[in-house]
Amino acid sequence: MYDFIVIGAGISGTSFAYKASKFAKTLLIESQDYQREIPVRTNIFAEHNKPFVDDVFWNDDSIFPRPFLQLNYKSEKHNGLLHSKEFGAPLGKISHTEILIQKIIDKFRDQGGTTLFNQTVSKVVRHSDHIEVINNKGESFTSKLLVLATGSRGFPLQKSLGFQTPDSFMGIYTNIYADESLLEENFSFQYMFHLNPTISQNGPFFFNVGKGRIAAGYLGNKENPAELKDKLFRILKNYQKIQPFLKGITWDESIPTISGGISKHPINSFSKDRVIVLGEAAGLVTAFFYEGILCGLASADIATKLLKPLLANDSNFTRVELKKYDDEVARVLFTYFRNGNACEYLFYNESSSTKTLWDSYTNLLNTNKTVREYVYEAHINQDLSTHNTDNDRWVGERLFATIPVFSKMTLWPKFLKAMSF
């Protein structure tokens, strides 16, 4: 019998498995064929992630090959730039995330952890004193506790165990390799977040600039993978607002793409008897920026810290005991989430105000140092339970003051509600 079985080897599942294997017999199951390849991922990795990452990874230049120095919150009218040199330290790092996941898995195995790749879970059976997991080969594994870290790929299993499922949208991204000198010439920033409701009313188009490679993608609506891919390459080839960044870089349909569900909005409970849910599977993703790495790492860290003494005391892992995990996730993340919820309410909708608001915000970022300071602080604050929502309200007030007079009357109720989040 295992102490813990973890389903899903994304950032939350691998992080949990690695930390748990220091004190528990742990099995990690992943449906993708990680023995062949972990999908390439280039991400921003804000400084506020640092408390949840061991130094052995944080200080590894192959995982984090460059600092995150400048962001671009881009609208159709403005490049809303924030450079960290204004405040004396980077916003964080850029991660080659598949390398991070691989090295976490390697450490997990070094500590005695067991992995099963290219295998799916067909059934979970609850027993009075353990959980039984049956894979697609008919093999059975038992555990004292089951950990769901399936992102948005395991909703049927999640529902079968009595959990809600979070809201989910389809997204797509691709990575392309390019000469580093070309990337340096084209991109002054490492991260671009661009809103255009014509592209999507639910999320951004983005660039993440790594070392010798760049990721690009967007969050769609309910398109199928073929439709997402077709639209992504039409954007990359034809969308004039981003063409200055793509000089000399060739994108064609032969480049691999990854599409799939992206979750947000926390479910009502992250734990039941002998089962907990981590990260994106629990909807622990910031509502506006779709920031999932932070929440995956944080929920994994919180869970391992709670479970270690419970395991040592031969716990039955009841809902009453595991409720502390829910409470701590809420304490650490939900104050920070309020800003994302308010921004989602303001910026993601079908109204014509979206472009006006985003144009005004990106210009405000360029012209107001205090706004830049507050955005910077949100990236580097390593205790997000202390996130200052008064700063967010102040920025909201400044934003309202800058929008055209004819928009104020119609948007005032919307701002008033957003301020209450």
Image (cartoon, helix red, strand yellow):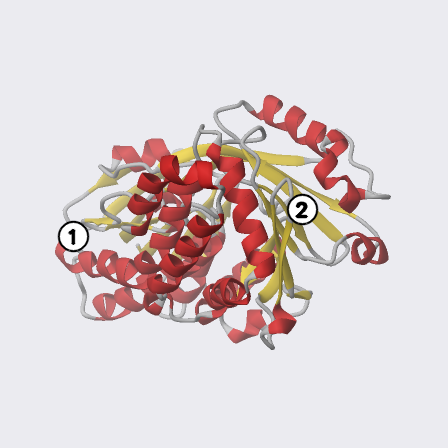
Q: Secondary structure at mark 2?
A: strand
Q: Which residue is mark 2?
A: 215
Q: Which residue is mark 1?
A: 319
x, y percent for residue 355: 54, 37
> Can you see residue 342?
yes
Tell me: 202 left or right of 302.
Answer: right
Q: Secondary structure at mark 1?
A: helix
At x 16%, y 60%, the residue is 321
Q: Is residue 382 above or below residue 245?
A: below
Q: Are marks 1 and 2 in contact (CB under 8 Å)?
A: no
x, y percent for residue 235: 69, 31
User: For the image shown, how many numbered marks are present on the structure?
Assistant: 2
Q: Looking at this view, is 103 or 370 the one in front?
A: 370
Labelled disc at residue 294: none
Query: What is the spatial separation of the Cα atoms under label 1 and label 2, in whole angstroms?
Result: 40 Å
At x 61%, y 22%, the residue is 226
Q: Along the polypeptide, which appears first: circle 1 or circle 2?
A: 2
